[in-house]
Amino acid sequence: MFKKISLIVLFLLSACASAPKQDDIKIFQNGIGYLEAGNKELALTSFEQACEKNVLAACLYLGKELNPDETMTYAVMQGMTTVSSTLINISVPSDLLPMVRLFDVTKGNFLPAKNVKKTVHRWENEKGSVMEIEISGLSPENTYRVELYSSPGILDDYRLFKTLPKDLKELKIGLASCMSDEFMDVQKEMWKQFIALKPDIAFLIGDNTYADVINGKYVGGVANPKQIWMRHLETRENLKFYHTRNLIPVFGTWDDHDYGFNNGDKTYEYKVESAEIFNMFFPYVKGKNTSKGPGLSYRFTLAGQHFYFLDARSFRDNYKNEKGTHLGPEQEKWLFKDMKGLKGPIWLVKGDQYFGKYHKYESWERYHPENFKAFLKKLKSEKDPALFVSGDRHLAEIMNLEKALVGYPTYELTSSGIHSKVYAGSFAKEPNPRQLVGIDGEYNFMFIKSRTQGRGLMLDVTSFGLQDKVQFSRRLELKK
């Protein structure tokens, strides 16, 4: 189920490689000491000697590329990121945590300890750990490296990362949802394509983990915290996205399957524990351009655009209660209060659809119609235009939303699933009268280029399928 923890096993199995000796590792460690002391010439000599003796970490410091199969042991994700800070999240299937070294590749020196904060998360007595590394004082011009060692000199893993550019005029976003690790071959190809597009940021907007699928079988029911914790660890270990050399900053929220209860609402008995676990894997970090709301909700601002990731599970009334609320009164109150101090286009992101009355599945419009109408009325009074973003439906579409709804024409973008069950003929059975374009029966993710235009947005939206297939592409203009 899980990958190796030490490269020593690989070396023993290889006819052309051997495990480095302690004396050779010591030479490498001496090189690190020289580098820390600012003596790059002596450090270089030590690294050259150690690299010749198969100390992989020393080869890395000489600028050599290393074999990913030998140096990509852990599941690593770059989380919330700004111009000068970022968060690195490392999940480990055992309780044996790696040693960490952080290096500025551009400047050739180590990051000061005062700029690094490490936190280790575990769930009660369950196996596995999550290491959270919060890093500040970074420059968007520089490339950085996080190195992970099972013991001094034995390099298990390293990743490269950057922060976000200061003056980002066009923002490239990779959008995905519904990531079942049942589809192992499909996920490898889909994430390879996703990563190759080099988005500035990735939005993982729900069903990032299927807590109710165990050993490839849907078990349904209510997932308990132990099961949720285990499935988060397994999903991280299994998906290619968490095993890529160049990290992509991730912003995420949940939907019902990572919540732990299919079509789950506020009655879910483990919602507090589930939120604790989700935050270990997708942590929120307070910053200059962020705001925290109730539950998992938060806002971050980037490139003149304001992104609200909403919690559509923790406070949701049962779907049979048509007079109930979807986000809960407190979350709605926070959202509209937070919007008041902003200028620029708004993104409203959540797991399931907003406008979905045309089908029998989950949506705000279908399950809580009165609350939805009241929400749209409030949104209508805001100064800046809003775009709706969702997943869940196991299909991809762009909805053309009429002016009467919020006072200006806008859109809902739905992307689902990047690798989960998809159903051909969905639109034939339940056609969407608001649909601008859509695709069903195919795996999909979206790649979005967005840039501000006055107080509005210009968007280039492309939906991709297997083998780099362009399922559809549209240029959209959002203005009020």
Image (cartoon, grey):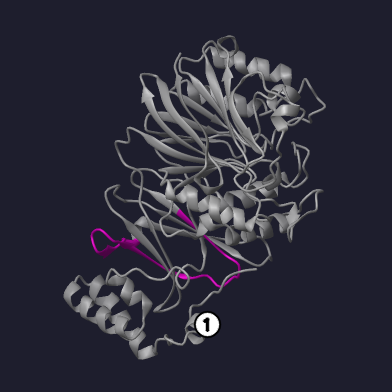
Q: Which residues are magenta?
A: 88-113
Position in image of residue 72 (x %, y %): 47, 67
In which quadrant of the rendered view does residue 32 lie? bottom left
Residue 311 appears in the figure: no
The local secondary structure at tag 1 comes to helix
Residue 444: image location, x then y, percent: 58, 41
Residue 177 part of the magenta segment: no
Residue lying at 76% horizontally and 44% vertically, measured from the top left: 261
Q: Nearer the viewer, residue 208 or 227?
A: 208
- Residue toward you, 340 or 469: 469
Residue 332's place in the image compared with 294, above or below, is above
Image point (55%, 49%), residue name: 282
The amino acid at mark 1 is: Val
6 relative to 105 in the view: left or right: right
In this view of the protein, which residue sits in the foreground, 457 or 83?
Answer: 457
Seen at 27% across and 72% down, the residue is 62
The answer to which image quadrant residue 404 occupies is top right
Q: Residue at point 48% right, 44% down?
A: 202
Disc 1 target residue: 9
Residue 91 within the segment the image draws in magenta: yes
Measured from the top left, where is residue 63 in percent x and y? 28, 68
Image height of 181 relative to 320, above or below: below
Give the image location of residue 411, x and y in percent.
54, 22
Q: Residues within 10 Å of mark 1 (few under 14, many from 20)?
A: few
